[in-house]
Image (cartoon, coloured by chain):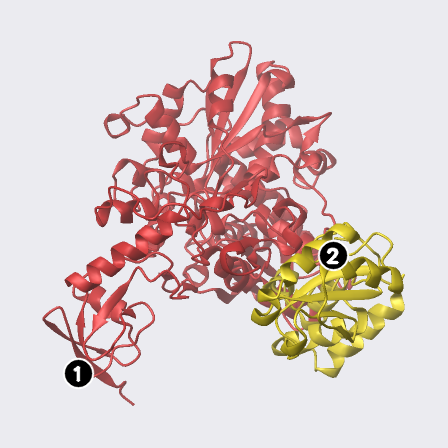
Chain colours: A red, B yellow
Amino acid sequence: MEQKKVTLRIDNHSITVPDGTTILEAAQEIGINIPTLCHIDLKGMCINNHPASCRICVVEVEGRRNLAPSCATKCMDGMVVHTSNLRVMNARKVVAELIFSDHPNECLTCPKSGDCELQSLAKRFNICEMPFAGGELSLRKREVTASIVRNMDKCIFCRRCETVCNDVQTVGALGAVRRGFNTTIAPAFDKNLSESECTYCGQCVAVCPVGALTERDNTNKLIDDLADPDKVVIVQTAPAVRVALGEEFGYPAGTIVTGKMVYALRELGFDYVFDTDFAADLTIMEEGAELLDRLTRYLDGDRSVCLPILTSCCPAWVNFFEHQFPDLLDIPSTARSPQQMFGSIAKSYWAEKVGIPREKIVVVSVMPCLAKKYECDRDEFKVKGNPDVDYSISTRELATLIKRANIGFRLLPDSDFDQPLGDSTGAGVIFGTTGGVMEAALRSVYEIYTGSKLNKVDFQQVRGLEGIRRATIDLNGFDLKVGIAHGLGNARHLLNDIRLGINDYHVIEIMACPGGCIGGGGQPLHHGDVDIIYARQRALYREDASKPLRKSHENPFIQSLYEEYLSKPLSQKAHALLHTHYFNKSID
Amino acid sequence: MADIKIACTVIAQVKSICDKYGNDPGELINILHETQHLLGYLPEDVQRVIARKLNIPVSKVYGVVTFYTFFTMSPKGKHPISVCLGTACYVRGSEKLLEEFKRVLGIDVGETTPDGKFSLDCLRCVGACGLAPVVMVGEKVYGRLQPESVKKIIEELE
């Protein structure tokens, strides 16, 4: 049956849209950008917040007494809508002014300044003074965790964070508390995030329109370390950073800026510029070997083997199952994340190779992620209190640093990563997108399991952005069943099935953020534009395709790391340096 | 907020209330009502039990508990005192009564005395405006009270 259509007029344009379309969506189609604040809709990613609470998007609908919120009002046949007449413009301005009246006037020192949606509205509505004074409540919570900083005085109650935390991620750490003027968004019992089920995925930060939720800043610490002549400061960059950093310098989303990024990092003063992609290749060696080990034992009739095996590269995902599925702690791979593998190898193998004591080395990571900040702080990733990765900065923080150091990013030439920890294959690159770890693993597992060469390295069946995907891969007659989930809500679906014993997967990849790391909480803000995430994903596959080597086990530097140091995947040394264990963090 | 560990028997009772409502998240308010009727308040541990039974985040339960003033997280005293601040009582001086209760008991609205004997709350109209200003202690109504009588009432109850 053909979907019913409705025809209406918006600002003297006639438009026909499918029944159920909101006025906001219809207006967007004809290039009328009604301002919004609380509303966010990442189509295809299931991130949709439409409480219609801010009233910024009001429009006049002829025949209605009150102005209507365009984000929540459906188009109807014959409707006549005005999006910018005097009544609407004045009402919108007053709504914004009322929001400002309960918002600290601290733009100069706010970490969100320049990227704040409320600030942009002030500019857009030409608000040059604050007509409504007083009534401001400044007793709400401030908290600094390893990853996320909360300053709830700045909260405008758009509920975006609550929606992603509950509906998308199903973590349920944040919720509205109390009512009226005393409302705040907080974990249960007004506790700290660090005492809640928070996974530090940072998706709340990624959608917060103002400065209420921001990241823990490590740039000042980094500047100090870079200036310290006694320290050897080395950096690793995650795959998803190179396809997003350019956005901060005016490049279109999906521009690959790997070479400029490496050059800029040297300009900043890093002694060595390495690549997390190298460690991603290493992860495939260990995680792949673990999969093959579990699989062969299972096929030999050993029913004590835990299958499916779940990936463990994503620290927010690790937090999620430690909190919410403590009964399944033996299912995920014990392989550390690429960030941690890098740190561990840098402060052992590489440190010995170049003859620098561990204590003198500062390992910094540039990550699209906020949970990584927390991850490097975990005690099991420290040797006598000295962390394998000293700290992590986000893609956004790197952009800030580059600007602060007067580096003209767009004019920079390309540069290559240092060796040996900077060389990677295409398999390492695609770790940055949902489905990428799986595809990288398949490329190696196929060849190692079957002993035959893979003709086509692209596994199209695991690519895409659907929340849960499944595929069956023919390994020379054995059907390997793989599953992929991104977004913790989707992960929960798969985990519930596993708990109930109703699944037939052999291996599952899980990424906490919608889209995988390309949509991470530390990336340049998408402000609700889902095309940005799609563009980053395409860019990662382009970068992969351009690499001469595309299978992790073919990386010559990985091969020599095993020859010189680790001997083979899952060896005793590999276990000590590259694997970890998990904790029951359930709160009850 | 008193941090009191809840007895197993109480937890079993709370669980059976949840069961009675089919562990349906849509029945959260009814479940909280009945639980508060049983315990007199809704401590943290009890909210966690309810969240787990209904399979919803505890932040959601806490959100509802803090949204409605009827729900309380501190245990009520043996003698719960409620001062009416409805219009009739208010104009006849109930605010002064409230201040006197606060002074004599040494607690604020919503609090309980350390010995657990008295708790103090406000309410809006019990339908006895002819007796204004009105104070309820448990189920008993005291009418036409003056601040001077506050001390006597408390002494009698002690």
Q: Residue A187 appears at what percent x and percent y?
A: 61, 53
* Label 1 residue SS: loop
Image-based side of A174 in relation to A411, left or right:
right
Q: Chain of mark 1?
A: A
Q: Residue at x 51, y 47 (%)?
A: A202
Give the residue type that dot 2 points to.
Answer: Phe
In the rendered view, tell whether residue A285 sits above or below residue A414.
Answer: below
Name the mark on residue B101: 2
Foreground label between 2 and 1: 2
Between B1 and B150, the residue placed more toward the observer is B150
Q: Residue at x 19, y 64 (%)?
A: A87
Give the residue type that dot 1 points to.
Answer: Gly
Circle 1 is placed at which residue position? A78
Q: Residue B64 appears at what percent x and percent y?
A: 61, 66
In the rendered view, tell whether residue A386 sits above or below residue B1.
Answer: above
In the rendered view, tell whether residue A299 sits above or below residue B141.
Answer: above
